[in-house]
Amino acid sequence: MFVAGHFYGAISIAQAYAEALSSFLCEKYHIRGNRNDPQKRWQKLFDGKIVGTGARDAAIALMSDRNDFHHLNKDVERDFRKMEARAGECVNLLYTIESEVFAHSFEAGKIRPKHPERWPDEGDGLTSVNLRQKW
């Protein structure tokens, strides 16, 4: 969406994905509470040492204007250049979050997840991945 110039959508999708990711991690690690507050979920994940300051801070920054975008508030930004800048920021914040949550290394041509329990298990030591770069 960002590449196609759909900045409002890129912002909203990045925020929704970060919300879903926090729900996934809370479920995976049995972190309870804050069902309707993604920023508090990210803080609980940090407090439980599931994520570090980088992912938490990026998630909180990403969610800072979440309600304006998700509820189509009248005060939401409309200037095209500012929307482009915010969308780019959101994509990069999401990259920061994913880089920590799905941290990995490459060894002998193989991906080695730091936290394999967070990756989809395809059996026989295999997982399904999609790699992308920061914009």
Image (cartoon, grey):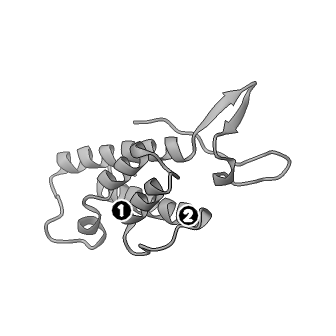
Occupied quadrant, residue 11: bottom left
User: Can the viewer see residue 2 in this picture?
Assistant: no
User: Can the viewer see residue 44 in this picture?
Assistant: yes
Q: Secondary structure at mark 2?
A: helix
Q: Left or right? Give the position of 39 relative to 103.
A: left
Identified at 74% across, 27% down, the residue is 109
Identified at 44% across, 56% down, the residue is 47
* Circle 2/circle 1 CB separation < 8 Å: no
Identified at 32% across, 59% down, the residue is 63
Q: Left or right? Give the position of 86 relative to 105.
A: left
Looking at the image, which is closer to me, 122 or 114? Answer: 114
Residue 39 numbered tag: 1
Occupied quadrant, residue 64: bottom left
Which residue position holds label 2? Answer: 24
Residue density around tag 1, few if under 14, some if 14–19, many if 20 or more, within 10 Å: many
Identified at 58% across, 67% down, the residue is 30
Residue 112, image x and y in percent?
A: 69, 36
Q: Is residue 135 above or below residue 72?
A: above
Q: Left or right? Give the position of 13 relative to 107.
A: left
Residue 34, image x and y in percent?
A: 41, 73
Looking at the image, which is closer to me, 97 or 115? Answer: 115
Q: Separation of disc 2 and disc 1 at Cα?
A: 14 Å
Residue 1 numbered tag: none
Give, as a three-letter code, the residue at label 1: Gln
Residue 91, image x and y in percent?
A: 38, 46
Please state, as top left, top right, bottom left or bottom right, where the C terminus lies in the image: top left
Q: Is residue 18 above or below residue 100?
A: below
Q: Secondary structure at mark 1?
A: helix
Looking at the image, which is closer to me, 21 or 49? Answer: 49
Give, as a three-letter code, the residue at label 2: Phe
Occupied quadrant, residue 71: bottom left
Q: Earlier in the sequence, mark 2 or mark 1?
A: 2
